[in-house]
Image: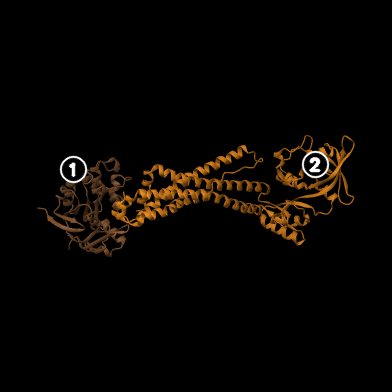
Chain colours: A brown, B orange
Amino acid sequence: MPLLDLKGIVKDYELGKTVVHAVRGLDLTIDRGEIVAIMGPSGSGKSTLMHLLGALDTPSAGTASLEGHNLHELSENELVTLRGKKVGFVFQTFNLIQSLTAQKNVELPMIFQGVRKSARAERARALLEKVGLGERMKHRPNELSGGERQRVAIARALANDPEILLADEPTGNLDSETGATILELLKKLSIDEGKTMILITHDPDAAAIAHRIVRLRDGRVVQEVRNA
Amino acid sequence: MLREFFRLAGQNVLHRKLRSILAVLGVLIGIMAVVILISFGLSLKGLMTGEVAKVFGVDTFMVMDQDVMSGKHSGGMKEFGLNLETLKGVDGVKTVAAVRQRTAFVEGGTNGEGNVQQGFMPVMGLSPELLTDFAAFTGDLVFEEGGRQITGTDVDAAVLRRELADRLGAKLGDTILIAGEKSNEITATVIGILAASDEKQEEQGFASSMSSSSSDTIYVPYATMDRLWPEGNDFLVTVVRILPGYDVDDVADRAEVALKAEGSRVSAITSSDITSVIDQMMSYINIFLAGLAGISLLVGGVGVMNTMFTSVLERTKDIGVMKAVGAKNRHVLAIFLIESGLIGFLGGVIGTALGLGITAAACWGINTFAGLPAGASFPFVASPTLILATLFGAFALGAVSGLWPARRGARMPVVDALRYE
């Protein structure tokens, strides 16, 4: 059974009075341990696909299942719980909570899963050390560089030991050198920790670390390429 | 998890210091107003019950006309008839003192032109027990040199105020003629003249508060009163002290029943009767004051709501992130509610402290500078109930004000929240 299985996915939005057909009949399966890059121009449905893959949203039509759970059949709270346990997000704009220290940001997903304080703190410290921020745990996001912020975000994504790392343009706000180290880190972690990783990206360098590249256009898959 | 939410909410409050301070200030002012007004009401009540207790004590009650306390009679004191012997015979009664009042024709000395000074004046008979056992009733009277108060052994003596002495042309040691009913007439020696009233003395004590025309009143011994008007249907007030070991309310009830059985239209009033009247009065005043303060609380609440709306809007993206990493709607709701509750609580703590401080200072100021009657004090009352109620109320005010904004934040779809810039 594939980890993620999308069949005949359609997603429409209402933007004011017009209906936007963001995804128009998309099939995609992703297996455990794969690194998949999803590429495509703006408006091709990348972000919408990321929301569906990350269980942030449900499709208008078609079936999306994560580890055999049909997202359509889950209540909102079940969806949140599933997402919290199975998916770790890395965003282009880092999306750290500014009022919290690096360590607290990493602890946040564990708080909502009800992990005990001591276990939480210990795991957050271990993860921050793993991403090379052992010395900066008590710093707030505005005291960290862009690369450091993204490392905190990666540590946060790993907090609940998810199956899937979902990275949306993880290098989009970083210079190329920093971006390269972040990609390196992502790749290493996904292999070391045995995570499935989905990269949504414009960046060919980012796509280069993937096992498979999926190209979208106008809400459909137009090309799938396996990297050698 | 709740503890963690408190921490998250606390961090949000601290992170936006200025705005939090302003919202706290709004609540603080409202809570302070409530605390000051209610504490002041409590102090006022303390002052009044303190004065009542001084006159009454736990072993004293008064017998008055039955309409005086019921509110049917609005003219202050009213004369009534009773049999003192019946009252003295009631089980538990130790001492009975009475005040009687009549209007009499009075003739004094002559003025410079040789005219006799005369007129109708109120005459008040004070029983000796009143002077010996119930000193608080007469208050501190100041006599002119050589003068003194009436005692139990005096016969045909009179005490006047300086104003009346001047009008009657009477000096200390002179005699005045007092005519009672039928042809009862006595010649009384002026044994004491009360010093011209300055305002402070005027307001003090029972004798001066008996009637508005008290500066006209001629005080005579009780026995003299009996000789002028043998029939005792002109009591203003009767004060009763009970024997130790008796309950004042029980004795008062028995006295009232016994007197009413003889046809006296009287009621026996204990300190608890008066205190309950004061309580009733104060509760109305307090409701009114609390209403006023409630308006400022409402304004504070609107301030918190405004702050929370801004806070939710500003943290839309944070809400999206929290939901993306596994926060349920109720988690987001709880965090924002706690945040607004904390703002309220903080305002409550500071507002209560400031309110109590200001009230304490005001009480001190009144006691020190306002010239209360001697022995009276305006007590500072820090009611634990009030403090607990305001602290809880402040947290609730904050949380309720934050409810609407917090719900909006909690219900925001995660995708929209994440996209928000």
Q: Nearer the viewer, residue A72 or B45?
A: A72
Q: Amino acid at mark 2?
A: Val
Crowdedness near tag 2: few (<14), some (14–19) or many (≥20) residues, C-alpha within 10 Å: many
Q: Position of residue A202 (x, y in %)?
A: 19, 49
Measure how far apart labels 2 and 1 are at the Cα level: 109 Å
B373 with respect to A179 (left or right): right
Question: Which residue is depicted at the point 71% across and 39% down?
Answer: B199
Q: Secondary structure at mark 1?
A: helix
Q: Is residue B115 above or below residue B239?
A: above
Q: Secondary structure at mark 2?
A: strand
Q: Which residue is mark 1?
A: A176
Q: Which residue is mark 2?
A: B159
Q: Position of residue B93 (x, y in %)?
A: 72, 54
Regarding residue A124, the answer to whether it shows in the image is yes
Q: Amino acid at mark 1?
A: Ser
Labelled disc at residue A9:
none
B324 with respect to B219 (left or right): left
Q: Nearer the viewer, residue B409 or B78?
A: B409
A196 with respect to A137 (left or right): left
Residue extending farthest to the front is A18
